[in-house]
Image: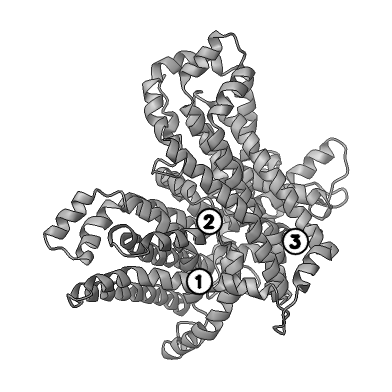
């Protein structure tokens, strides 16, 4: 990077901010100076229009267009081929199956571990620090997490010393080192571990807060009735945090459906590890199969939709109860 | 013993997650009682189990951190856990990754600048536009406000993948000529500039941003706004003098969430940055390095650690805001 490059970049940032400030400043200036008649109208337009224009160009129009592209050939004729491809080609089917495996495993396992951890550390000494440790991966980018875990899964051939922790453990127990990232179907599960590693902290923080919301009286009453810890957990704590459990499960499901960076960084979808979001990118931007990419995007949307609607409903009901 | 268990505050701003809000109050009230209960609830096995999970969760990052400070030769031939047998400590990896000028080795300097530039402006644009829109939805009465707001809210459901192809087409038709023109006028600004990435991030952030900020801004007591109106304040004045200062906590939460989101993003960068060191952020470069230099672990570990350190710093420095923003925005993307 030369000094001129750096200057150019600085200039861009300054210009970008200047344009933003100028547009907003001018808008608000003119709104306040608008003629009395219809001033309300102009004020509304001034405040709302920039965001709405951005949304129209960036999301509304593209979403509609993608939905149409999914049903078109590259020549623009109407067809169902893209979907036929998605549901018949072995590689595409594998992508769908992988996505199902991801979405079944990640939310359940992260929630289970997160819940267990939250219960274990509840009101213990140093709870704060325990929480930070598990929560930290959330701040790390998926790319960073991908590199961290690729290092754990690293493979060295033959008798060379293993530098990846997992293979070191395997060889320490007398096993042969494994090319983890190339071994199908093991590799998909190893990628899933990365996502679980990231999402567990999220589940833990939410569930921990929910657990603290369970009235102590209920737990003490159960205690007086002579229940043991497990019975109290199943019959008092879990029903008490049902709402939070649903929110955690659905939220992680949505994030998992859209997972892209981990697969992209660790295997680029090779060795049968692709998922829908990654395949969408590969088809649309690497293979120039815009129709197939759009079909996959549409499928992704349709998969996310019911979960989001359900999630919103639960949240709304909870708020009504309160 | 009163450890504040709610020190990682979960969504205390309204809405994000129920149960969290009462937490603090509750634990304060039952503080003494729970001290007794605590002893019985936390058994030794639980502590051990928690400890094991905590260690398992830390080891991968720890290994990366150690390796990034080990000499290249040692990183490639020995495991990081043998650091005491194969002692060695160096800053060369970081020097190499950051400052090296040779063509063949990755110079992350340019990409770090890009990441900062993209994250800063990619946060500010949606923040400003969303605050204005949120104000309009909350305090300017108009027909169809409710329906329009629900539509904006519903846009959160649309996955990024739905928008990528058409938006790229729009940008290459409309934005590219403007970028070329700018390059002609100001030659030090490359033809590939930040504009597409900034705009894409801004567009994708808006539904969530408007929703969150609206929730907050709508809660400002109407007496305050009415009083200002009676005194003859215009919407512009109310917006700058009253709403902005009062909404600062919500704005900060969203700003931090969006900054981290943009900093950690790979997908948007891959599609809109063009991939050169003129625009591409750190994440994109690292992902590329994994592909092309997947065996150079001394560089990868150092590079990865540099990319991680900023969000982690934000995380530890501004934990309260960070968690709030993160929980509220967890379905984004």
Q: Residues within 10 Å of mark 3 (few under 14, many from 20)?
A: many
Front residue of B157 and B309:
B157
**CA separation, marks 3 and 1?**
27 Å
Q: Chain of mark 1?
A: A
Q: Residue at x 73, y 71 (%)?
A: A292
- Horizontal side, residue B132 vs residue A196: left or right: left
Q: Which residue in the protein does label 2 denote?
A: B332
Above or below A2: residue A183: above
The x and y percentages for residue B89 are: 61, 48
The x and y percentages for residue B214 are: 36, 55
Q: Are marks 2 and 3 in contact (CB under 8 Å)?
A: no
Front residue of A224 and B310:
A224
Front residue of B238 and A171:
B238
Q: Residue at x 51, y 57 (%)?
A: B261
The x and y percentages for residue B78 are: 74, 47
Q: Which element type, helix, strand or loop, lies under badge 1? A: helix
Q: Chain of mark 3?
A: A
Q: Which residue in the protein does label 3 denote?
A: A269
Query: Does label 2 lie on the same chain as label 1?
Result: no
Q: Residues within 10 Å of mark 2 (few under 14, many from 20)?
A: many
Q: Are marks 1 and 2 in contact (CB under 8 Å)?
A: no
Q: Chain of mark 2?
A: B
Above or below B179: residue B330: above
Q: Which element type, helix, strand or loop, lies under badge 2? A: loop
- Quarter the N terminus of chain B occupies: top left
**CA separation, marks 2 and 3?**
23 Å
Q: Residue at x 85, y 62 (%)?
A: A90
Query: Does label 3 lie on the same chain as label 2?
Result: no
Report the disc number at residue A58. 1
The x and y percentages for residue A46 are: 30, 72
**CA separation, marks 1 and 2?**
15 Å
């Amino acid at each position: 990077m030369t000094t001129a490059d750096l200057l150019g970049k600085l200039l861009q940032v300054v210009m970008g901010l200047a344009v933003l400030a100028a547009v907003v400043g001018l808008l608000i200036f003119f709104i306040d100076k608008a003629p009395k008649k219809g001033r309300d109208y102009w004020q509304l337009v001034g405040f709302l229009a920039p965001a709405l224009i951005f949304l129209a160009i960036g999301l509304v129009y593209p979403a509609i267009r993608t939905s149409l592209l999914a049903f078109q050939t590259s020549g623009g004729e109407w067809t169902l081929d893209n979907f036929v491809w998605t549901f018949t080609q072995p590689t595409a089917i594998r992508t769908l199956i992988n996505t199902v495996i991801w979405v079944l495993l990640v939310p359940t396992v992260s929630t289970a571990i997160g819940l267990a951890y939250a219960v274990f550390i509840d009101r213990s000494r140093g709870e704060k620090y325990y929480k930070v440790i598990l929560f930290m991966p959330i701040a790390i980018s998926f790319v960073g997490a991908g590199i961290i875990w690729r290092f754990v899964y690293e493979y060295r051939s033959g008798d060379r010393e293993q530098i990846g922790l997992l293979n070191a453990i395997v060889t320490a127990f007398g096993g042969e080192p494994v090319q983890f990232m190339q071994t199908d179907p093991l590799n998909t599960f190893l990628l899933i571990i990365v996502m679980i590693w990231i999402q567990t902290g999220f589940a833990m923080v939410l569930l921990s807060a929910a657990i603290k919301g369970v009235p102590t009286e209920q737990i003490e009453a159960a205690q007086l009735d002579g229940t043991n810890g497990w019975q109290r957990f199943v019959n008092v704590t879990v029903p008490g945090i049902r709402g939070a459990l649903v929110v955690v499960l659905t939220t992680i499901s949505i994030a998992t459906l859209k997972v892209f960076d981990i697969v992209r960084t660790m295997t680029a979808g090779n060795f049968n590890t692709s998922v829908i979001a990654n395949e969408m990118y590969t088809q649309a931007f690497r293979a120039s199969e815009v129709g197939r990419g759009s079909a996959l995007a549409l499928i992704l949307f349709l998969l996310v939709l019911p979960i989001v609607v359900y999630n919103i409903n639960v949240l709304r009901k909870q708020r009504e109860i309160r | 013993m009163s450890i504040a268990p709610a020190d990682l505050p979960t969504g205390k701003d309204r809405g994000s997650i129920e149960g969290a809000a009462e937490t603090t109050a509750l634990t304060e009230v039952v503080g003494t009682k729970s001290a007794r209960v605590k002893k019985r609830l936390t058994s030794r096995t639980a502590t051990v189990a928690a400890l094991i999970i905590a260690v398992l969760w830390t080891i991968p990052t720890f290994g990366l951190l150690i390796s990034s400070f080990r000499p290249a030769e040692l990183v490639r031939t020995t495991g990081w856990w043998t650091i005491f047998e194969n002692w060695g400590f160096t800053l060369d990896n970081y020097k190499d990754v950051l400052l090296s000028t040779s063509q063949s080795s990755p110079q992350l300097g340019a990409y770090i600048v890009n990441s900062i530039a993209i994250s800063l402006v990619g946060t500010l644009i949606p923040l400003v536009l969303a605050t204005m829109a949120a104000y309009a939805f909350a305090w300017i009465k108009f027909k169809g406000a409710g329906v329009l707001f629900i539509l904006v809210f519903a846009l959160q459901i649309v996955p990024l993948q739905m928008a990528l192809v058409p938006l790229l087409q729009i940008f290459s038709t409309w934005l590219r000529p403007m970028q070329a023109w700018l390059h002609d006028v100001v030659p030090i600004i490359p033809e590939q500039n930040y504009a597409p990435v900034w705009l894409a991030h801004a567009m994708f952030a808006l539904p969530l941003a408007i929703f969150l900020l609206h929730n907050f801004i709508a809660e400002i007591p109407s007496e305050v706004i009415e009083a200002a109106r009676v005194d003859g304040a215009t919407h512009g004045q109310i917006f700058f003098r009253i709403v902005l200062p009062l909404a600062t906590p919500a704005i900060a939460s969203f700003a931090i969430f969006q900054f981290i989101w943009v900093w950690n993003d790979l997908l948007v960068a891959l599609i809109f940055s063009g991939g050169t060191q003129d625009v591409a952020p750190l994440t994109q470069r690292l992902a590329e390095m994994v592909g092309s230099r997947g065996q150079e672990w001394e560089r990868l570990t150092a590079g990865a650690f540099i990319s991680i350190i900023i969000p982690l710093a934000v995380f530890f420095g501004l934990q309260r805001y960070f968690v709030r923003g993160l929980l509220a925005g967890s379905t984004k993307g």
